[in-house]
Amino acid sequence: MPNHLVIVESKAKAETIGKYLGSDYTVMASYGHVRDLPEKGLGIDVDNHFAVEWALPQDRAKKVVADIKLAMKGADTLYLATDEDREGESIAWHLLELLQPKGVEVHRMVFHEITEDAISEALGNTRQIDMRLVEAADGRRIMDRLVGYLVSPVLWRRVPSARSAGRVQSPAVRLVVERERARMKFVAAQYCDLSAIMNAATGDDSRSFAARLVEIAGQPIATGKDFDADTGLLLETSKARQLNDAEADALVGALDGAVYTVTSADTRPFTEKPKEPFRTSTLQQEAGNKLGFSAGRTMSIAQGLYERGFITYMRTDSANLSEQAITAARIQVAELYGKQFVPAEPRRYKSGRNAQEAHEAIRPSGERFRVPASVRSELSNDEMRLYELIWMRTLASQMENARGNTATLRIGAQAGDEAVVFRASGKTYSFLGFRAAYIDVSEDDPSAEEAEAVLPVLAVGDRVNCSVLEVSPHSTKPPARFTEASLVKELESRGIGRPSTYASIIDKISSTRGYVYKQGNALVPSWTAFAKTQCLESHFANLVDYRFTATMEEVLDKVAAGEAEAEKWLDEFYFGRDTPGLKQLVSQENLDTIKMEVVNSVFIGNDSEGIPITIRVWKNGASLHRGEEEKCAMPEGVLPDDLTVDRAIEILAKGTIGPRELGIDPETGLTIIVLTGRFGPFVQVGILEPGTKSKEKPKRASLFDGMDPETITFEEALELLSLPRTVGEIDGEEVTAQSGRYGPYLKKGTDSRTIGSEAQLLTITIEEAAAIYSQPKQARGRISKPPLAALGAHPETGAPIVVKDGRFGPYITDGATNATVPRGIDPAEVTLETAVQLLAERAARVDSNPKRTIKKKAVKKKAVKKAVKKKAVKKAVKKKAVKKVLKTAAPRLAQGSSED
DNA sequence: CAGTGAGCGAGCTTCCGCTTGACTT
């Protein structure tokens, strides 16, 4: 009979540890936190030492606690083996509170490596729960609740489209907003330089190389860094010379027939160190840059790999490798690449500040790493790519430095009476080192790979030929928008958020709250985000101060060390001391000083008469204003940094024309008008008097792309209003043509197909429609795959049963029910009998769990989100996602797996 | 696979960190 009970946080960990501990031990998971503040209400008695009313555990946790209680009945020892960090300590304590064990010995136990030795050592070195750590964790929880639940209501009252504020999400949004502000303020500068292709005039080494003009008459040529981002002018401190088109052209002329001579030739050795092994944030960044995965996708794939034992824990802030891992890596490097690739001493990596180090780095699990090719058959394509990335980075982190030389040539010539200098640089590797396994992608330009550039061997005084000489025009670029990857990096570097939350922060500020949306991979702030941010900046400055979390961490560290009290800290924050506390900031008197017309309007610029142009945000959408008088709906889809004053005036001009009457609708006798709304210009049957709320919505239709509200004719309007149009019948089913959220499409029953242009909606014939329907349906640009196997007819229903390969792996379908092929069963080997059984089980599960409630608010939100989505889709298509291929020079074992 | 103008109107909303479901095709 097992008489020792061990509690860890995750299921997968419980299973692994269970294997090591044997039959005397039962290992169970707490599944994270078991108790929290109530969802409704503050749950904190601020006037009574910030006493917390912990809510009853939720259903999930209730079951966990009940199960553990049951298991505890026969046990004589309870080991609380949650993670060794603040949150882990808190979980242990809350568990203990809920379990109330009687007659059971309780130990707190921690281990850092999941090996037999480490665990048995941990069992022999238990301690008691550290209440100081618990105090720090719960202090953190209380602080987050105070901020979130007291400041959010202020936003509801003053920036109605902003739903929430928080210690983490609000600075995250502010980062995106500030970047966009910098882009809006940015003034581009135009400048030129000369680029040349040269080669040695004498000797055997005739390879050509690229060179660039860097100096005229001793003065450097201006490059991007010499310009002021806010004015587009040369910085006052810059000594560089800005070359314009004409001057550059003249220079090319003056250099005609010039003699080029090497004036200096330098070679310097360099070494490059590998990057440290992955932790959560860096994994998300690299998977984003190299594989194009979102942070959320990366985490869910990693979760699968972890649960099935392929990698170590994926939510970690540590880049430290265990001894077991270092040994495994070194052995494998020697086997695959050779001994010369193994450094004399193992490399050790330190973690950044605020790291809690409850886990090790993310790496292939086990004491012998599985080579990607050997796990190919067990992993899906995405899992394979992520595993390979982790495997390579881990190996590389324990490999030798790369070594090489950089060479620089300076080449002089005479342009008229001015001496000019060109420069060429080269880079060669004498020893690849870690680069043999893993090449880094640069942050700014993920597609660029630092290639070798070999210069010919030249000495001072050597003559050089110039085969090509041309003007290169340049334009300075505004700071790039954040991507998911770069935002995670920024948040981590500022200590904001935790490994378990980076992906959910992104999700929160984008999908859930709509403060940012994606333009390709770039994150763009909504107008609401601007308003929310400026409201917080002017009235809750310390909450959106990027140092807020870092300062909090310092305090909590002191609390954990017994050098400070959480209550004192909370007291000061809430009641205030030298500066007003939160209580006062969210009070009614203070709310009265927050003027809606100030905080919900975003200043764009002044027109030529000095009249301010602003955007005002409302619950659903935004309006554009010039001064007090002129205003119109702000169309969605205009990126903030595209909204110049000129553009705004253009929009105002179109939007404020007011309805234009086109004619009388012959059917209804009502006037048909054209007007502009937040989705652009549209026509409408009948005029709505302002203020009257008619129940019957008038019929409306958007203008096609390219139609102008000023020139649209009555006939065109009638055609638009005639949609959706019945095209004809195919196989007795009616086919209609209409516009939807993904553009124009045909519809036959439930089968819909997109069509090329909006104009086709009016012209497409039933024959053309039939041709489209005769083609197999394209699923997002991909033709649906043929089934893996056909198993025959269902014995009861007669429906054909087939095995297909879907997004979530192989599954069985009879057309009505889909059942995933369980792991461990080869999809090619599924028999009809098993398939019928699996389908029946699946159907039974669906029936027993029918409640899938849709919340009201979700429906409402959809409309807003859709519009955003539409733009993103349109642009994304134009841009045509460039597939990023994993750069690797890894040996054959790793190859053949990254091209899918 | 759809909506639109302006902007008090009725009642509701909200946080962060630890986990994994149940669910897609």
Image (cartoon, rainbow, N blue to C red):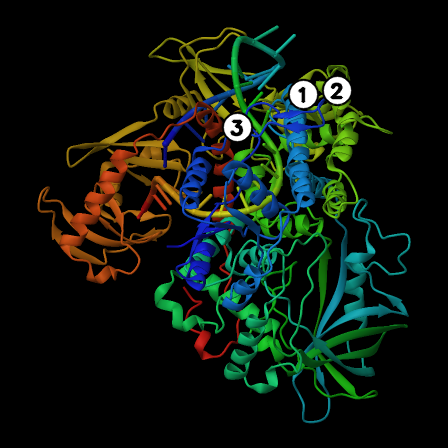
Amino acid beneath label 2: Ile
- Closer to the chain start, of discs 1 and 3, is 1
Q: Which residue is mark 3?
A: A680
Q: CA distance from mark 1 to mark 3?
A: 27 Å
Q: Which residue is mark 1?
A: A158
User: Residue, x 53% and y 56% (percent of image)?
Assistant: A314
Q: Which residue is mark 2?
A: A594
Task: Residue A864: give x, y in percent of width and height.
Answer: 51, 29
In which quadrant of the rendered image does the C terminus of chain A lie?
A: bottom left
- Closer to the chain start, of discs 3 and 2, is 2
Residue A520 visible in image: no
Q: Nearer the viewer, mark 3 or mark 2?
A: 2
- Contact (Cβ within 8 Å) of mark 1 with mark 3: no
SS at badge 2: loop
User: Residue, x 80% and y 25% (percent of image)?
Assistant: A610
- Contact (Cβ within 8 Å) of mark 2 with mark 1: yes
Q: CA distance from mark 2 to mark 1?
A: 7 Å
Chain for numbered disc 2: A
